[in-house]
Amino acid sequence: MPLILETIVTTADPDGALHLVPFGLIRDGDDFWVAPFRPSPTIANLEAVPFFAAAAPSDMRVIAGCVTGRRDWATVPCRDIPVPRLEAAYGHMELQVAEVRDDPVRPRFRGRVVRAEAHRPFLGYNRAQSAVLEAAILSTRLHMLEPATVLAELHHHRIAVEKTAGPAEREAWNWIAAKVAAALPQAAGGSLAVDDA
């Protein structure tokens, strides 16, 4: 199994309009593949402007926000590509598309790293951040997984949020909990939300 890095990918259309989206980048040697499902603004952007930035967000609200319709996050210019990156990042990579494997459902774009930078120290892992990441991914698969499976996993991850989350992780979790509750009537009875710290 390949290593998959969960990142925030930034792409741009020819007019400079940005699209920020959480993506699991698939490592292949020194390169990384991005494989969006059709239809996707990411596909159109990469076909028109074959560059993307991948950032390790320092605030889990960015990932939770993107999967719940909150996409207005600050960006800053990249040094070597014409696409900006997420500002709130531990680090980022700037990638140029080196290969495209077309597919009617899920094309793949191989990104070659042209620059990688660190921006702030990474001081340690937090279980609530991992729980928010897993919840965000689950929330994008509500149409693919059994509701009982989704809810069981979310209730399990909720424990880590209750025990270890700071205010940002609690807010991120609650955005996802509201999305799931709106999509799955079964979630309304047993609240997934957590109290503010």
Image: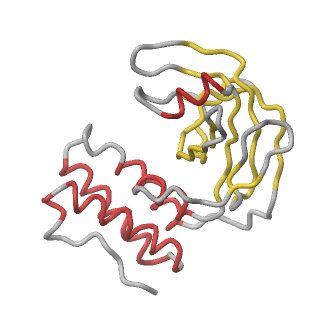
Frontmost residue, 144 versus 100? 100
* Residue 3: % across, % down: 60, 34
Query: Which quadrant of the rendered structure holds the N terminus?
Result: top right
Residue 39 sits in quarter: top left
The percent position of residue 136, horizontal first and vertical second, equals 42, 54
Q: Position of residue 90 (x, y in %)?
A: 73, 58
Picture coordinates of residue 74, whole percent (x, y): 66, 60
Outermost residue toward the front in this view = 15
Q: Is 92 left, or right, of 3 in this rendering?
A: right
The image quarter in which residue 60 lies: bottom right
Say which residue appears at 55% left-offset and 59% top-offset. 72
Q: Nearer the viewer, residue 164 or 53?
A: 53
Tell me if residue 81 comes above or below residue 112 in the rendering.
below
Q: Is residue 155 above or below residue 167?
A: above
| Colouring used for the render | secondary structure
- The residue under the point 24% across, 57% down is 151
Q: Residue at x 73, y 67 (%)?
A: 123
Count of labels in the image: 0
Answer with the quarter of the image where residue 6 lies: top right
The residue depicted at 83 percent of the width and 32 percent of the height is 114
Is 11 or 142 nearer to us in this picture?
11
